[in-house]
Amino acid sequence: EAGVVQSPRYKIIEKKQPVAFWCNPISGHNTLYWYLQNLGQGPELLIRYENEEAVDDSQLPKDRFSAERLKGVDSTLKIQPAELGDSAVYLCASSLGAVRGAPYNEQFFGPGTRLTVL
Amino acid sequence: GQNIDQPTEMTATEGAIVQINCTYQTSGFNGLFWYQQHAGEAPTFLSYNVLDGLEEKGRFSSFLSRSKGYSYLLLKELQMKDSASYLCAVSPTDKLIFGTGTRLQVFP
């Protein structure tokens, strides 16, 4: 079974340019997450989707960041315009969501996109 | 507020045992997760605790004390491949709050 797929793996752009990241979750996973991970830090949640609905975007900087999950499968995360401080790894994760009888809701992570803003 | 603390770095010798501690203060608790993350790779699930006590899974064990807001990950018979970051994450509701991670270096 394929894991969470992300592209591109690496992206280098100049500040003020736009950038987009793509994520394909594990088949059948209704919940999708975008995280930001700075060097030496743990992942920080940006947005969480249940199917196509964004149910938690409280940590998403909405002035420059946007996300969508059309048809409740693939998702894209966009930054426009990018700033120097946006340099980080952007992780996508997916899970089945809360399942009755399941002891926990394990999140499966993709390899991430490493963004460098010059 | 939400706060999760774990040591930044640890070192150990191949074949030894190491314990990585995690303390937390969160509004709500639905369980505590440990993830392993090798440099440049995705975090991968190691363990989950929601009740007090020890969960053992091969060379790895995880302990939880909810009253103390404390957990530890115990790695036995360390191997070189165990060199990685270990992330403690708490689920206060239906999302994960991660600590900064503990970078473990295993030396021969």
Image: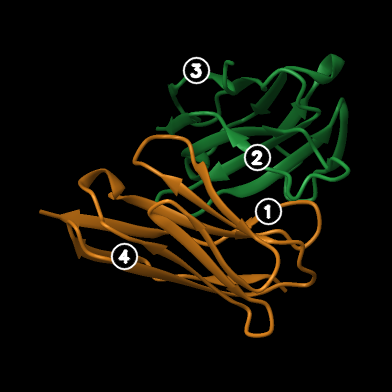
Chain colours: A green, B orange
Q: Quadrant of the N terminus of chain B?
A: bottom right
Q: Are marks 4 and 1 in contact (CB under 8 Å)?
A: no
State the separation of the CA atoms marked 4 and 1.
22 Å
Disc 3 designates what residue? A8
- The amino acid marked with disc number 3 is Pro
| Residue annotated with mark 2 | A107
Q: Chain of mark 3?
A: A
Residue B43 screen position, x and y as percent? 49, 41
Secondary element type, mark 2: loop
Q: Are marks 2 and 1 on the same chain?
A: no
Which residue appears at 51% of the width and 53% of the height? A42
CA–CA distance in space, label 3 to label 4: 30 Å
Residue B34: in sight, yes or no? yes
Tag 3's secondary structure? Answer: loop
**Cα distance between the residues tagged 1 and 3:** 25 Å
The residue wearing badge 4 is B9
Residue at image position (69%, 84%) is: B67
Marking on residue A102: none
Place residue A116 in its image quadrant.
top left
Taking depth in this image into account, of A114 and A105 the one nearest to the observer is A105
**Chain for mark 2?**
A
> How far apart are the alpha carbons under marks 3 and 2?
21 Å
> B19 and A52: which one is in front?
B19
Element under disc 4: strand
Residue denoted by label 1: B96
Answer above or below: position of A101 versus B8.
Answer: above
- Give x and y (percent) for residue B68: 63, 85
